[in-house]
Each structure stands twice: as C-alpha cells, then as structure tokens.
Image (tube, grey):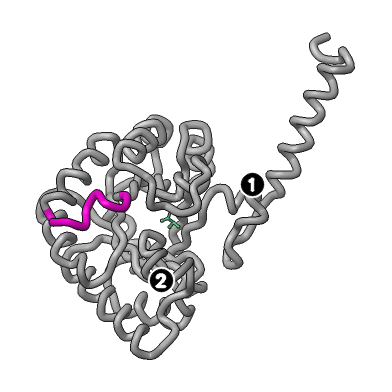
Amino acid sequence: MSKNLGQWDKAKRDGRKMTMITAYDCAFARMADVAGLDCVLVGDSVGMMVAGDANTLCVSLEQMEYHTRIVARAVSRALMMADLPFGSFEESPAQAFASAARLIRAGAEIVKLEGGAPMVETVAYLSARAIPVCAHIGLTPQHVHQFGGFKRQGKTQEAATRLLDDAIALAAAGARMVLMEAIPSELATRITQRVEVPTIGIGAGPGTDGQVLVLHDVLGLNPDKAPGFARAYMNGAALIHEALTQYAEEVRANIFPE
Ligand code: KIV
C-alpha cells in the first residue's frame, strides 16, 4: 500500500481493510513497515507504553517530535501518522498549526488530534493549510479526567447521535480519516457508512474500514494493562523474560561468552 492518502480512500471504496499499529522507536517501526502495516502511528500512548505514565496527559510536543523523528527514519512504505499531544492544539487553530508543522517537519505525513465538534474549526484550518488530519473520537484518552476514567463512549442514544454528528462534521471540515475508540460496534459501523473518508477502529468492532492497536498490546508486552478489546498475537513478556533470565544465568555460570 502506498503512502498516498488517496490510496486509503480507494481502499474504502474497494472494501479493503486497512491496518495501523503504534510504534515509538526505530527498531519496531522498521518491523511494522517490513511486515506490511499500512500506517505507523506515533501515538501519545508513548507516555504510557514507554515512559510509564498513568495516562497520556504528560506527553509533550518535544517528546512527540523526538519519537516521530526516530520512527520516520525506519518507515519507508507505511503512512506516517503522529499524535498532537494534550495542550499543543486546543487553544486555537493557529496553535494547532504551529504544533502540527513541527510534527510534519519531524517526518509525519498526517497528524491525529482528539476531540469532536469543538475541533471542527481546527480541522478545517489545518486541512486548508497543507496538513492532513485524522480526527480521533469516542474514548479520547486526553479527556480521561472529563470521562472519569478510560470508559467506553457512545452508549446512550444521545451520546451516539452526538458522535455520529461529530464524525460527519469533522469529515466535512476536511479530516482525511476518522479514528473511533471504544464505542459500540453498531455505532462505528453506522459512522463508517455515513462518512466518505476511511474510518479506523480500536475497540469499535469489525465494521470500520481499518483497525489500529497499540504495539505493546499486540506483542503481549503489558499483559496486565492491556484493554479488553486488544488481542496479543504473541506472549512477548514471557519470551523476553525467558531470554533475559537465560542470558543472566549463562553469564553467571560462565557459559557465555565462550
Ligand atoms: O496514542 C495512541 O496509541 C492512540 C491509539 C490508541 C489509537 O491514539
């Protein structure tokens, strides 16, 4: 799959599912690129996965620039997406443009920002100024305090209607993709049918145009913290534990080096 965003629109028209995964460093980004993932997302989940924070709110624009730069070095084929972190875009469209431009210069080809209706003006502003945007709605982790935790969204009729309206407005404002996190499957399917741009789901069922997961969840590196909707495709924590203990044992037993 080409990096061209037009290919994503075509994939939606053709009913071909798109794949996205997070990456925060060069080694894993290269593996994701070589494995054929369509998009690598430098997510602000870096704060939780790499820095050990309890949520994503502490992540700075400088951190995102650094991780975007090192991931971009490894990605030659997949689309490069990077998150605008909390506090770097909400004040005004001009603030969002200045922050997004820094991520684009660091190697991002599209930026993702969290929020519904209040972000419509910002999405239009960025889109009119050469910055492709992915709009992230539903369980937007930067709103964790407002939500009172990492809670599923769109459960009531009213909330579902609001999310549908938000998605339509964000797409109309120029968002090139809509990412939906932890919302009911039927709602995500409905939104996917109503908007012309590709939708990406995480914990939103099988009806979206593509899926995204956090790298550490896919590799089974944080089995105790992974959300219920994630799937581990390997038991990374156990495999790494085995390798590290074996290395230490062999050094202590004078087996390594030979
Ligand atoms: O930061 C992130 O990893 C994300 C995904 C959960 C979509 O935004």
| Amino acid identity at mark 2 | Phe
Tell me if residue 182 can be seen: yes
Q: How many residues crowd around disc 2 within 10 Å: few (fewer than 14), some, or many (20 or more)?
A: some
x, y percentage for residue 141? 41, 61
Say whether residue 119 is left or right of residue 136: left
Q: Earlier in the sequence, mark 2 or mark 1?
A: 2
Q: Is residue 40 left or right of residue 240?
A: left
The location of residue 204, given as percent across then percent down, is: 48, 72
Q: Nearer the viewer, residue 250 or 128?
A: 250
Q: Is residue 4 left or right of residue 258?
A: left
The front one of 198 and 234 is 234
Residue 91 inside the magenta-drawn segment: yes
Front in this rendered view, residue 143 or 129: 143
Q: Residue furthest bottom?
A: 157
Which residue in the protein does label 2 denote? 147
Q: Nearer the viewer, mark 2 or mark 1?
A: 2
- Position of residue 133 measured from the top left corner of the image (x, y, whole percent): 25, 56
Q: Please give the name of the residue rendered at 18% of the width and 63% of the height, measured from the top-left corner.
A: 174
Residue 9 shows in this picture: no
Q: Secondary structure at mark 2?
A: helix
Task: Give the labeled residue for mark 1.
Answer: 221
Q: Which residues are magenta?
A: 85-93
Q: Residue at x 38, y 30 (%)?
A: 73
Locate the C terminus and report the quarter of the image it occupies: top right
> What count of labels does the image hold?
2
- Three-letter code for the amino acid on which mark 1 is drawn: Leu
162 is within the stretch colored magenta: no
